[in-house]
Image (cartoon, grey):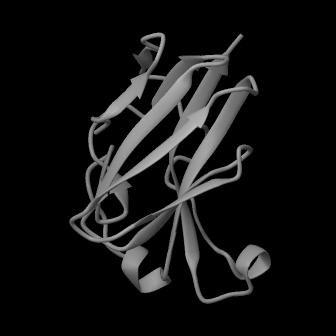
Amino acid sequence: MSIEGGELVGDESTLTVNQHDTVTIDWTSDLPLLVHLHGYNIETQLDAGETAQMSFVADATGRYDIYIHASESVLAGAGEPDMGGMTSDSMGSMDNGDAGEHRDHVMTDEATNGGGGAERLIATLEVRP
């Protein structure tokens, strides 16, 4: 999955996998960011121009938001939303599902991280039984 200017590149915003799949997401970004898979509490640090991998077993079913965390100045830029580099062991499918009504949501994390940063919803993981 590629992130440019704090936005996911491409039209796909939902990754759909099956419960118990081993999921591997290769992340790249033009900015230094932290990617956080809410609900699974998995975080991956991205360095600008480098690839970082997020791997986990999708044990819990449901829909889980994927946010990026960065300084507000880093997220001030805009980009075009791509989803390359995603795999699942049972060939989980990708769909054009809605990432929710807060697709372009940006919130300071003062309430969650003590201030100084921002988070932005970039995608959703859907784990089916």
Quarter of image, res 36: bottom right
Asked if residue 91 is positioned above or below residue 124 in the image, the reply reads above
Asked if residue 119 is positioned above or below residue 122 in the image, the reply reads below
Q: Which one is in front, 57 or 68? A: 57
Looking at the image, residue 81 sits to the left or right of residue 123; the answer is left
Asked if residue 41 is positioned above or below residue 20 in the image, the reply reads below
Quarter of image, res 21: top right
Q: Residue at x 29, y 65 (%)?
A: 5
Q: Residue at x 31, y 65 (%)?
A: 78
Give the quarter of the figure containing the C terminus: top right
Q: Residue furthest bottom?
A: 116
Q: Residue at x 42, y 12 (%)?
A: 91
Q: Residue 39, percent across and down?
A: 74, 44
Looking at the image, residue 97 sits to the left or right of residue 87; the answer is right
User: How many badges with numbers are in the image?
Assistant: 0
Q: Residue 120, percent across and down?
A: 53, 61
Give the quarter of the figure containing the N terminus: top left
Q: Residue 35, percent across and down?
A: 51, 58
Q: Which one is in front, 101 or 50? A: 50
Q: Residue 57, percent across and down?
A: 62, 30
Asked if residue 122 is positioned above or below residue 13 in the image, the reply reads below
